[in-house]
Image (cartoon, rainbow, N blue to C red):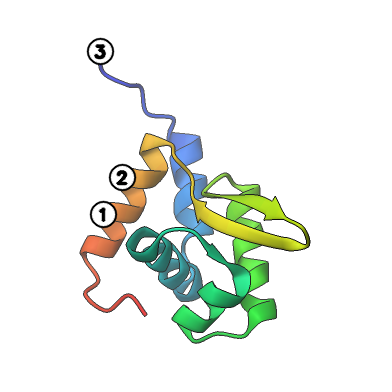
Amino acid sequence: MKQRINFKTLATHFAVVGYAARLRILCTLLRDGEGSVTAIAHRVHAAVPVTSHHLQVLAKHHIVTYRRTGVHRYYSLAKSAAVQSLVKYICSHNQTTS
């Protein structure tokens, strides 16, 4: 059975990921898997507070998820097929993900 496309949700996802820093974060999560804010910031060569802000926005829009361990959050890509497909498509067209 073919899945229906929710164009409003898809448009929101494109708007949210329309920042170079967020694209680097998403491609890093796709490549390396789950990571703490500090580890992700290090991988994308960005400040921790900036990375944390971008991750919070991505989480608010269900593009990434996180789990909490004590005071730390560990982020990963959301499991939805739409998010996975979108991120794979974007990252496959970018050979340098960091």
At which x and y percent is residue 3? 32, 21
Marks 1 and 2, how far apart at CA: 6 Å
Give the left or right position of residue 80, taking residue 74 as reference: left
Marks 3 and 2, how far apart at CA: 18 Å
The amino acid type found where label 1 is placed reads Tyr
At which x and y percent is residue 17? 47, 60
| Above-or-below relation of 94 to 47 | above
Give the left or right position of residue 29, taking residue 65 as reference: left
Q: Mark 1 and 2 residues: CB-CB less than 8 Å, in contact? A: yes
**Residue to which mark 2 is pinned:** 85
The amino acid type found where label 2 is placed reads Ser
Q: Mark 3 and 2 residues: CB-CB less than 8 Å, in contact? A: no
- Where residue 51 sits, quadrant-wise, is bottom right
Upstream in sequence: badge 3 or badge 1: 3
Marks 3 and 1, how far apart at CA: 22 Å
**Residue to which mark 1 is pinned:** 89
Give the left or right position of residue 27, taking residue 16 as reference: left
| Above-or-below relation of 2 to 21 | above
**Which residue is outermost to the top?**
1
Point 41% across, 44% down: residue: 83
Q: Residues within 10 Å of mark 1 (few under 14, many from 20)?
A: few
**Which residue is outermost to the right?**
71
Question: Which residue is nearer to you in this view: 90 or 36?
Answer: 36
At which x and y percent is residue 13? 48, 49
Question: Which residue is nearer to you in this view: 26 or 18?
Answer: 26
**Residue to which mark 3 is pinned:** 1
The amino acid type found where label 3 is placed reads Met
Q: Residues within 10 Å of mark 2 (few under 14, many from 20)?
A: few
The C terminus is located in which quarter? bottom left
